[in-house]
Amino acid sequence: MTEIDEGFYSRQLYVLGHEAMHRMGAADVLIAGMRGLGVEIAKNVILSGVKSVTVQDEGHTGWTDLSTQFFLNESHLGQNRATCSLPQLSSLNSHVHVSAHPGPLDKDLLLKFQVVVLTDSSLDDQKRFADTKDSVGNQLFCDFGKDFMVLDQDGEMPASAMIQTIFKDNPGVVICTDDQKHGFSDGSKVSFSGVQGMTELNTRGPWEIKVRSYIGDISGFSEYERGGVVTEVKQPCTISFKPLSEALLDQELLIFNDFGKMERHKTLHLTFQALHTL
Amino acid sequence: MVQLVGSLRKELADSLSTCKVLVVGAGGIGCELLKNLVLTGFKNIEVIDLDTIDVSNLNRQFLFQKKHVGKSKAQVAKESALQFCPTANITAYHDSIMNPDYNVEFFRKFMLVMNALDNRAARNHVNRMCLAADIPLIESGTAGYLGQVTVIKKGLTECYECQPKPTQKTFPGCTIRNTPSEPIHCIVWAKYLFNQLFGEEDADQEVSPDTADPEAAWKPEEAAARATASEKDGDIKRVSTKDWARSTGYDPVKLFNKTHLTQTSLFKDDIMYLLTMDKLWKKRKAPTPLDWQQLENREESPGSGLKDQQVLGVWGYCQLFQHSVETLRTQLQEKGDGAELVWDKDDPPAMDFVTAAANLRMHIFSMNMKSRFDVKSMAGNIIPAIATTNAVIAGLIVLEGLKILSGEVESCRTIFLNKCPNLRKKLLVPCVLDPPSANCYVCASKPEVTVKLNVHKTMVLSLQDRILKERFGMVAPDVQIEDGKGTILISSEEGETEANNSKFLADFGIRNGSRLQVDDFLQDYTLLVNVLHTEELERDVEFEVVGEAPDKAPPPQSNQEDVNSITNGNKDSAQPSTSSKGQHVEKESCFLSFVSVVAFPLILKLREYNLRIKIYLMAL
Ligand SMILES: [Zn+2]
C-alpha cells in the first residue's frame, strides 16, 4: 500500500476518506478520445489520484478541437491528440503515471484497465466494448458489470456512539451514553475502538448486534475500564448493471425528465443514437 | 482563431469578445471558470484574489503547479489561462475585493460579475457592490460533492442576503473554560490557548477556569475553602496568560505542570481548581488532572496507519505539546520583540500544538482523543473539496452567464448539484429564481432592522465591530443618531470618533426605540437600525436581531426542490465531513470520473449540434 500524500490530497481526503483514496490509488484508467470531453475527464481523474491514466486517441489535432481541448494549441495542428496532451496532463499530478496511446482501441488493450472511459467512439464500438468488460461510456452510461460491489450504499457516516460501560457477560452488554440516539438496528454490524481495559474488543469483530446490545460471548475478556466508541460496520451489497446494448432498449433509461417535458428526454435519447449515425 | 463554430449565435459570440467580466476568486471554482471563460470566447477578463498558492490547492486548482507555491493565485491563474487562449486580455489583482479601491465605479465597468469565493464576508460585500452598481452577479459555492450556482439581479431576484444564513456556531465561554463535553470544545480551547500564548490576546478567548460560572454558584463561605484548595488567593485569572508564559520562558513542562506555588498550569492546577467548583461535577464526570512527572516516559504502543490518522497516547501528546511549544517559541523569538504568531491550520507546529493541547484536555475530561486529521478538520473549518464538483459548477456558471448576456435573465435558474440523484434521478436540480424579499435588510428600498441589546452594556466599539461589521457585513460604517440633532456616533474618517469607542450607547442618549442611520459609503448602502433595549439577553450574547432565531439550522438537503432559495452552497456554512471512517469506496471513485462527464465540454459539444438542451443525467 503506497502512502497518500496528505498535503496534496488534504481537502479531497475530507470528501472521500482514506479507504476510497487507497482504492483509487490502485486503479488503472483508460480514457479513450482526447477531444474536449476526454481531456476534461482526464484532468479530473488525474487530479483525483488514481494509479495510472492512459489517454488513447488515433486522431490528429484539428482547428475545431482548439475551442474545447484546452491542452492543445495551434502548434499541435496535425499531430496526434493524445501525444500532444501528454506533457500537460502529466504535470497535473506527479503521483499519477500518465501515458499516451496513439494506436487503436482493441480488446486486449481494454483488458489491462479497471476503468475504461469511452468519449469519442462510435455506438458500435461502444456496444462491442461494453460487452467486453466493465466500462463507462460517453453518454454518461454507467456499466460497472453484473456484480459490482458497493461497499458503502449511502456514503453517510457510519452510526457511532460513545460507550458508557460494558458488562462482561455472555452475551456481552454494551451501554451507550444516554441522550444519544445511537442509530443502530438489529442485525447491524459494529466494531469497537478506544476501549480501555477490555481491549480485546478493539481488535476483534465486526460484531452483529441486537439492539439492547448483546455482542456475543465476551466473558473471557478483561474487565472494562473506560472509554471507547462503537461504530457501525457497513455491509457491502452487490448491484447488477445492464450492458449497454441491453440498456439501450430499456425504457427505464428514458425516465429521467425535466419538469414534465416528457417527450424531451426521449428525443434526447434518440438524438444520441442518431448522432452516431452522422 | 476558430471559436465554437456553430455552437453560439453570432451576436452572442460577438458580445463575448467585447464584454468585460469580473471573476472574484481564483481558487477551486475560479481556476475552472477562467479556463471555461477563455474557451467560450470571453476576451476581457479581470480576476482578483487575495491568496497565495498552497500545496493543498494543487489537487484541484489545476492552473497551479508545485513550482507556483507561495505565488499570487490571481497572477498565476492569469498566466496559465493565457496559454489556453493567448489573445485573451486578462487583468490580475493580488488583492482583497473588499479594498476600497474596488468601488462602485470599478464594478460598473463589467457586464457580469462571477463570484468564486470561499467566505461569507466577501460574498456579502460583492452582493452589495453589484446591487449598488446594478450589475448581474452569478454566485456559486461547493463543498465536497455538493454545489450551487445562482443568479442575482437587482430588483428581479433575491439577493445573496435576502435569506438569513445560519450564523457560525459559538460556544458559551463557561463551556469552553470549565465544562467541555465534546471534542470541539477542547479544540476551540486549544486554539484560544494558542492565541493567548503566541498570538494576539483577546479578552473573549480566556482559557483559565471561569470563576463566575453561574452554574457553580457558591455560597460566600465556600469561597474560602476553594481558595485554600487551589493554594491561591481565590482569583484564578492570570494577569496575562502571555506574561505568565513568558515568565516561564515558554517552558513546556512548566506550562503543563506548575513548578512554583504562585503559578498555575494548564493541565494540572487549572483542572484541580475546576474540581473545587464541585457543583459543576454533581451531574457530570469530573475531570482528572494530569501530572507531567507521572506520565513521563510512559510506555505506549506506537499507532498504525497514516501519521495524520493515528491517535497517540497521552504521553505521545505530552511530547507533541513539548515539541510544538519549543518550535513556536523559537518562531516567536525569531520574529523579535512584541511579535505575534497567527494560527494557521496548514502550519505544522501550530496544528501540532492545537492537536496536542486539545487531546490532552479531551483526555482530562474523559473524551476519546482524536487524530490530527480529525482535529484539523474541526479546528481549521476545512471545506472538503474535489476537482469534479468545481468543474461542474464552473461549467454551469458559464451557461448562466451566456443566458444573462443573451438578455434572457428570466430563464436563469438556481442549480443545485447533489450528492446522489433525487427521486427524479437527477443529480442537477434547477429551481426558479425567487423575487427579492421585501424585508431584506440589504436589497429592500429602505432597509431596516431591529436589534435587541442592552444600551447600558453595549459599547460603541462593539456596535461597530460586532453588529455593523460582523453581523451586517459593512466595511466602514458611519452612524448618525436620529435624535433631531444628527449626532455623529461613529465616523469612518480616522480620528473623528475614536473617543466614543469605549463609551456605552446610553451615554449618547440611545434608549429603547432610538433609531440609528448607518451608512457604508463604499457599499453605497444605508441601513436604519431600531434599538430595542433589553436587560434579558442570555449570558455571552451581546445582541439579537429581531425576527431571527439564533443558530438557525439550514433546511435539510432533501428539500432542495421546495426551497427555491440560496440556502446551501455557501461554503463557509457547509459542515466539513470528518469522513476518515466514511468508507465512500469504489462507487465513489467511479462516480468521480462519471460526474466529470457532465462537465463543460459535453455541454458545449451538445450545443455544437444545435441541440438546445441543458443538462441531463442519464444513469445510476
Ligand atoms: Zn436581498
Image (cartoon, grey):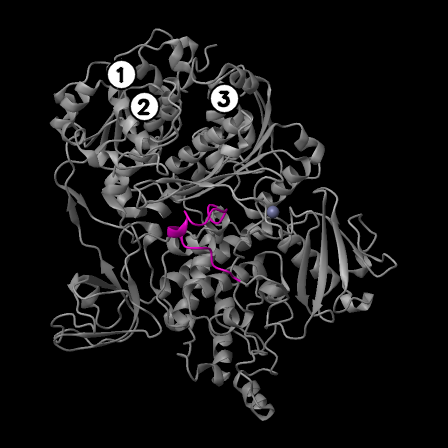
Q: Amino acid at mark 2?
A: Gly
Quick one: SS at disc 1?
Answer: loop
Q: Whole-Å distance between the Cαs marked 1 and 2?
A: 10 Å
Mark drawn on residue B477: none
Quadrant location, the N terminus of chain A: top left
**Residue to which mark 2 is pinned:** A38
Which numbered disc flags the more N-terminal residue, 1 or 2? 2
Is residue B561 in the magenta section? yes
Residue that extends furthest to the top in the rendered view of this protein:
A78
Res. B137 visible in picture: yes
Q: Position of residue B500 (x, y in %)?
A: 80, 60
Identify the residue shown where x is 38% and y is 73%: B294
Query: Mark 1 highlights which residue?
Result: A57
Q: Identify the secondary structure beneath mark 3.
A: helix
Amino acid type indicated by mark 3: Val
Instruction: Name the mark on residue B38.
Output: 3
Circle 3 packing at 10 Å, graded few (<14), some (14-19), many (20+), is many
Callout 1–callout 2 Cβ contact below 8 Å: yes
Given this view, does label 1 or label 3 mark the residue nearer the observer? Answer: 3
Q: How many marks?
A: 3
